Image (cartoon, helix red, strand yellow):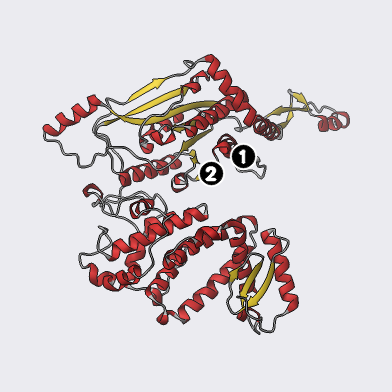
Amino acid sequence: MIGTPTSPDDDLLAHLSRLARTLTGQEGMEVVVADDGPQLLSNKMVLPTDRLRSGASIQVTIGYVDLLAARARFSTPETLARLNSPVARRLAQAIDDRRACMRLVANYAGAASFLADLRLEMERKALEHWSTLGWKEKLVWRVERFLWNEAPTATELSPSLNAAIGASSDVLEQARAVTSSSDSVRVALSLVERIRALAAGDVNNMMLTADAESILDAAHTRSEFESDEPASPDGPSSSDATSVGGSSATQTQSDAGLEPSGEGTAGAPRRSPQNSPILSVPITTQFDSVTDLTGKGDPVNWRKLRNAARAQTEPLKARLERALKADEQTHWKREQERGELDRPSLVRLATSPGYRMPFRVRRVGPGRDAAICVLIDRSGSMAGRKIELARLCAAALGDALTQLGFASEVLGYSSIEDAGMREYYQHWLAGGNSPSGFNRFVERLDLQVYKRFDSDNLSGLACIECGHENPDGEALAWAAARLLDRRAHRHILIVLSDGYPATGDGNAAILRSDLQARVDDLRGRGVELIGVGILADAVEAFYPASSVVEHLEDLPGTAFAMLSRTLLDHRDWMLEIPDA
């Protein structure tokens, strides 16, 4: 129920209402003040009454409008409202607010300063009432601090809060990377489950001592969380929620030696006690296979695939070609004795006796001197429509790059259990070898080449099919080695994937550490990496440039647009991604 505004300034409210309509794109949006603000109703932004009192900061007031506009434009309130647990609902709102605000700032850069002023005002209020806040309210605030990269003050520090935030850092990094309100709910539920497990002493984390009761104030923390109503029946189970953070609640013995960091970025490499990245090392590579399918696809199937791909990306290819030509035509070396006639120099030829250099020579720029590799995740989760669209996407990229004169290669990867490797492993163990330090035992790499750099025959792309598992780090290293062997001014590697790295016989945490370490190494060697997530945002945790495809039909256009922007070196010229 909206209360009666206190001495409103009509001119200011009118100005704020116009701002709200601009930010939200909703013609009927109106800004009012009331005791129950701030909140967002169907066509009203309700600000707290103190926002229009004498001396109130107009920057903070606009910050409230920006926050509510972000919710109105980029959030789905009904998704958050379905949560029964109050603390989960507050956490989901905090996570989704930060996501929505980042979207708003991307569209209206000026909103950043007003949101910063609002965060300072929220900090002032939190510290003013800190001693009266319950543990859950303090936790929600510390989560907000983490999401917004704000350092907590000394007042906000306590052993239980510090331990809770530190032990949940992997889930909180997932919270920074959410792309929808549904994701925010999912990660919030995961965070609640992690804290519950922490309070119950169920989490084996290097940041915690054996004396969990004193470190965590566990009895108090447990009672705080267990007093909540149960989570929504529509939400994930506790096991599902915990998996969002990237590991099970109880780590395996091989994972116990890893040193987790409370400050790391999403997907940051776990490290050994010697502070070197943990890599995924196989006991042997002798069973790994590389199959060259270049030119071995059915010609009829390839022509059908190529025609379908061109129907989707031909306009994008034409725009890219025009942009590349325009860029190349701006590079000329003038004042030459031979070459193409330079019209501006004709005046000097007529007015300066003895002038003999009225020519120009096109300078060959590096625009098309790039080697490009497309690497496709062939894991079992890609089965069905995903692999069909990945095949179409690879066809669109490969066909366009070949027509445009770029050196390109298309590869695929998976791993599969191999009887020979299992037998080798059993003999290896019987010989007294220790599995410590290794992370692939019975699965061999199944690597496929659909189009080599030295061939223009793309029919092999019609052979792209699913495999089983996806050890991304090892596959990335294989693809990058082939790419770097190709002499070129630039090396670009685009990865199509639908999730985190996984194998049937490996530790998931080590697989992620391995992928991140290899990405970091390749970036240091000048490889430009692009990750395209297929209905999954895992690529955002690892690749410096990434895009998540939420509608499968957008995959070819999205991948082509990402690659085009990279080829054009992030110029202002942008490709429009076709609507689904």
The residue type indicated by label 2 comes to Glu
Name the image quarter holding the N terminus.
bottom right
Up the image or down, 336 lies above or below 542; here it is: above
Q: Mark 2 points at which residue?
A: 550
The residue at the far front in this view is: 233
Up the image or down, 262 lies above or below 495; here it is: below
- Percent coordinates x, y for residue 302 in the rendering: 54, 19
Q: Can residue 211 be seen in this view?
A: yes
- Percent coordinates x, y for residue 474 in the rendering: 36, 35
Residue at 38% across / 27% down in the picture?
447
Name the image quarter holding the C terminus.
top right
- Percent coordinates x, y for residue 478 in the rendering: 39, 31
Up the image or down, 450 lies above or below 18; here it is: above
Residue at 30% across / 48% down in the picture?
276
Q: Name the residue under label 1.
A: 580
Quadrant hosting residue 306: top right
Sequence-earlier tag: 2 or 1: 2
Q: How crowded is mark 1: few (under 14 residues within 10 Å), some or many (20 or more)?
A: few
Quadrant hosting residue 312: top right
The residue at the far right in this view is: 351
Circle 2: element type: loop
Circle 1: element type: loop
